Amino acid sequence: MVKEKLSVRDLVFTGSLLFGLFFGSGNLIFPVSLGQHAGQNFWPALLGMLVSAVGLPLLGVCAVGVTQSNGLLAIASKVGRHFGRIFTVLLYLMIGPLFILPRLADTAFVISFGPYTTDQTQTWFLLGFSLVFLGVAYWLSRKPAKLLIYVGKVLNPLFLLILAGLLLVTFIQPLGALDQRALGGYANHPLSAGFSVGYNTMDLLAALAFGIVIVNAVRQRGVTTPKMIAKETIRAGLISTVLMSVIYGCLAYLGATSVQDFGVQTNGAVVLAIVADHYFGSLGQLVLGALVILACLKTAVGLITSFGETFEQLYPQVAYQKWILLVSGIAILIANVGLDQLITYSDTFLLFMYPLAIALVLSALATVFVKPPHRWAYRGPMFLVIVPAILAAVASLPGDLLDDSKILSQLVWWNAALPLSDYGVGWLFPAILGLLIGLLLDNFWDPRDSLSDQ
C-alpha cells in the first residue's frame, strides 16, 4: 500500500534503525574519554563534539534526503561520473572491509573477551570470535528487507536497554563532580578539542554510506514518491541525532564524574570497564561485554548491507549475496592478520576523505536553494578542497616517514600555513570559496562551455 508518510510507529523504528547503524563502539568510547579530559570545560567540549559528531551526520542525512537520491553514488556523480564511482568505492572500502568492519570485530573481542585470554591463546580466540561475530553480521545482512526488524526493532532496543541501565545508575549515584582540571587541548581550546573527537567518529561518512539503507527502508514501508521519501529520511535523521545527542551527553558525564575516584584512564573503554565493575560487581564485565558486542554488531550489519547494495549498483554483474560474503570474508582476514598496520594509516585516509565528504554535503544542501544547473556548485568546492585534504593527510603520516622525505616535510609546512589548519579545518575556507565560485559559474557561465560528464 502506497503511503504519503510513515506512521509514527514506523518513523520511530526507522529513526531507531538509523541510530543503530551509526552508534558503534567508537561512539560509545569517545564521549567517555572526552568527559575525562574536559573536566571543568565539560560543556564547551561537549558542544564541539555535538557539532561534528551529530550536526555533520545530520547534514549528511539531509543531503541524501533533499537531493532525493538513493545514496552516495548518486550525489557524488554530480561532480562527475568517474569521480562519483571512484569516491564511492574508496569510501566504502574505508568504512567497510579495510578499516571499520575488522575494527568492530577486534574491539568487541578485546573489550568482551580480552581479559579472559592470554598472549598464547588470544590469536586463536580472536580467530574464532571474528568468524562468529562477522558470520552473524553476514547472516543478518542476507535479507536487507529485514534490516528494520533486526536492527531497529531488536538489536538497538536491547542495546539501549542495557546502556540505559548503566547510565541511570551514574545519575542516581554519581561518582564525582564536573570540577576536575581540564587536560591537554581541552584546557585552552575545549570547543575545537571536542570538535576533533566528534570528527574521529566518522559518522558523516557513515551518514552518506547508510543513506541507501534508510531510503530503501522508507520505501519498503510504503512511501514511494521521491519527495516524501526525502522528507521521511530527514525526519528519521532528526530522531536519530536527538537520541545520539542525549546519549553522548550522558556518556561524557559518566567519564567526567569518574575522574575523582578512578583518575584519568588511557581510553574510554577502560573507564567503562571500571565503572561497570564499580556499580555491578562481578556482572560488570558481562554488562559491558554485551553492550559493546551489540553496539558493534548492529553497525557491522549496516555496513555489510550498505556495501552490498552499493556495489551491486556499481557492478550489477555480481549479485548482492556475493558482495556481502566477500566483504565479510575480507574483514575476517584483516581483523586477524593486518588490522594494527591499517589502523596506523587510518587517520591519513580519514583526513583525506572527510573534507571531500563535507564539500559534497555542502554542495548538495546549497543547490536546494538555487535553480539548475548545479554542475559547478559541486565541482568548485571539490577542486579547491582536494589540495588541503591531501596536505592534511600527508601531515598525519608517521613522523619517521616525514623526517626522511624533504618533499613530504615541505607539504607539512604548506598544510600548517593554511588558515584554521591548527583546528583541523584547513579545508573550510577553500570549500566555501569553491562553492561561491561554483554557484556564480552555474548562473553566469554558458552550460555548453562547461566540462562534460562523459
Image (tube, rainbow, N blue to C red):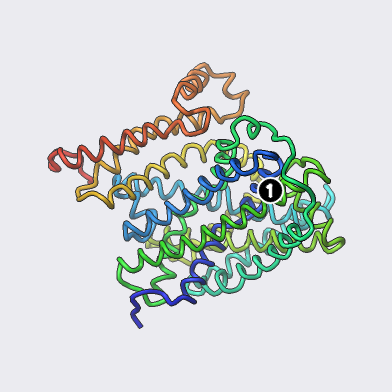
Q: Quadrant of residue 224?
A: bottom left
Question: Residue 386 location in percent, x, y?
Answer: 39, 34
Residue located farthest toward the top when viewing the structure as drawn: 406
Secondary structure beneath disc 1?
Answer: helix
Residue located farthest toward the bottom when viewing the structure as drawn: 1
- For image coordinates 51% across by 74% down, the residue present is 146
Q: How many marks are shown on the rendered structure?
A: 1
Query: Left or right: 399 with respect to 216?
Result: right
Closest to the observer: 329 or 90?
90
Q: Is residue 127 above or below residue 432?
A: below
Query: Left or right: 248 with respect to 218?
Result: right
The residue carrying pointer 1 sits among few (fewer than 14), some (14 to 19) or many (20 or more) residues within 10 Å by Cα, namely many
Query: Left or right: 314 with respect to 126?
Result: left
Q: Is residue 199 above or below residue 8?
A: above
- For image coordinates 50% across by 71% down, the residue present is 12
Question: Residue 425 location in percent, x, y?
Answer: 47, 34
**Amino acid type of disc 1?**
Val
- For image coordinates 57% across by 69% down, the residue present is 151
What residue would you read off at disc 1? Answer: 32
- For image coordinates 33% across by 49% down, the residue present is 364
Q: Is residue 434 above or below residue 24?
A: above
Question: Residue 339 location in percent, x, y?
Answer: 64, 45
Residue located farthest toward the right when viewing the structure as drawn: 282
Question: Residue 327 location in percent, x, y?
Answer: 54, 57
Closest to the observer: 290 or 432?
432
Closest to the observer: 155 or 321?
155
